[in-house]
Amino acid sequence: MSLLKALKAEESRAEITRLTRALDKERQKRTQLEKIIRQSARAAFSSWDPPEVPAPKQDDRGRGEEIAVAMASDWHWASVTANYNRDRCETLVQEFGEKVVRLAAIQRADHPVKRFSLWLLGDMGSGEDVFPGQAHEIDASAVDQVFGVARLISDLCYRLLAKDGFESGEVVCLPGNHSLGSSKRSPYHPDTHLDRLIYLAAKERTRTDRIRWKITRAQDADSGRILVHRVGNYGCLLTHGHLFQGTGGMAQIPFYSFAVKALRWRDMMLAGQMPPFQDLACGHWHKTLRYPIGTMTLRVCGTLQTMDPFSREQIAAATVPAQYLMFVEPKVGKVTAEYRVDL
């Protein structure tokens, strides 16, 4: 090997070493941040005693069991409008939990409904610097949002586990677009996301082994901002909804983008680059919609926020607080019933 080549090889090794150390340092920062959030959540909730939630009476009927799938998105806790604030948000979340339990009881009169799957599709908090002037539309810091929304999610979980509710469940968590440093030039790592911090704190507060948690990470091959989640043999592609771009159609909802992107994701699935799924679900658009795309169905979960500038100015639509609920037969792998849950 010539002297020049040897020098270049040595420089390459030195650069690789430097980059490896820098990467390790960044990974350590992210690990420390998550550790701080978990420790802070334990300290914040240390004096809180979880409620006693005895499991419901066992349902031993032989008919096929179904699973309740509750979608929640766009709570925008800390946002303030003419008729929406933190107290209003809390009231609506409590009402949503009550209605999920009551609607499950209706289904349970015919067949077992023992388990729930709660899909949190993002924008549960509001962030701080998502757009210019946002500071004048919120009344809580990002830190307060983390623990305030975590409490609401945890309380909702405990309500679903009550004696007139479900034996067990799972919580599936995806990020939205209202985060810390939401601009394209944000210095934050994708995992340093307000929703993710909320989910980590909510998991710490919900101290029961009757619930499993799936909190996505940006570097996971099958998650990040897109996750194909399975409920038995039923697969659904979950995302927040801001990945659908463009306007057009009724009230500026991007139906063309819905269709094009859904069909392209299905092509990726058929090419083996994505797990199999039958339908799609998202939030973001502050409207509750059911939109057929070929053999697939896109379900758009609504928002709790009312009279917000986004709905009034961008999609020119009155906002009715609503979330989404459906029932899935896991063995057959299909949706058997669904509700727009008006609140």
Image (spheres, grey):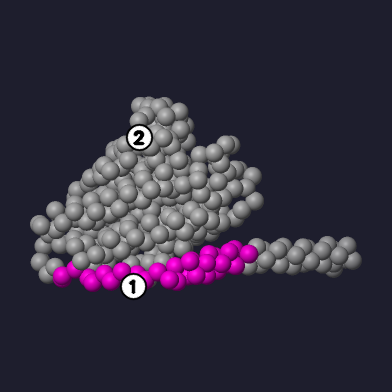
264 over 231 or under it: above or below:
above
Can you give x and y, in whole percent of width and height, for residue 109 in the image?
A: 10, 57
Q: Is residue 272 magenta?
A: no
Can you give x and y, in whole percent of width and height, for residue 47 in the image?
A: 43, 71
Q: Nearer the viewer, residue 250 or 16?
A: 250
Q: Secondary structure at mark 2?
A: loop
Q: Amino acid at mark 1?
A: Asp
249 over 336 or under it: above or below:
above
Q: Amino acid at mark 2?
A: Thr
Residue 319 numbered tag: 2
Q: Nearer the viewer, residue 66 or 181?
A: 181
Q: How many numbered marks appear? A: 2
In this picture, residue 266 sits left or right of residue 60 = right
Label 1 CA crowd tier, 10 Å (few <14, some 14–19, many 20+): few
Which residue is found at the position 29% from the left and 46% from the top?
324
**Residue 296 visible here:** no
Residue at mark 2 to residue at mark 1: CA–CA distance:
37 Å
129 over 174 or under it: above or below:
above
User: Image quadrant of residue 136?
Assistant: top right
Q: Nearer the viewer, residue 191 or 261?
A: 191
Which residue is found at the position 60% from the left and 43% from the top?
184
Can you give x and y, in whole percent of width and height, for residue 198 in the image?
A: 47, 58
Residue tagged 1: 209
Can you give x and y, in whole percent of width and height, for residue 227 in the image?
A: 42, 54
User: Image quadrant of residue 11?
Assistant: bottom right
Residues in magenta, as a range:
29-58
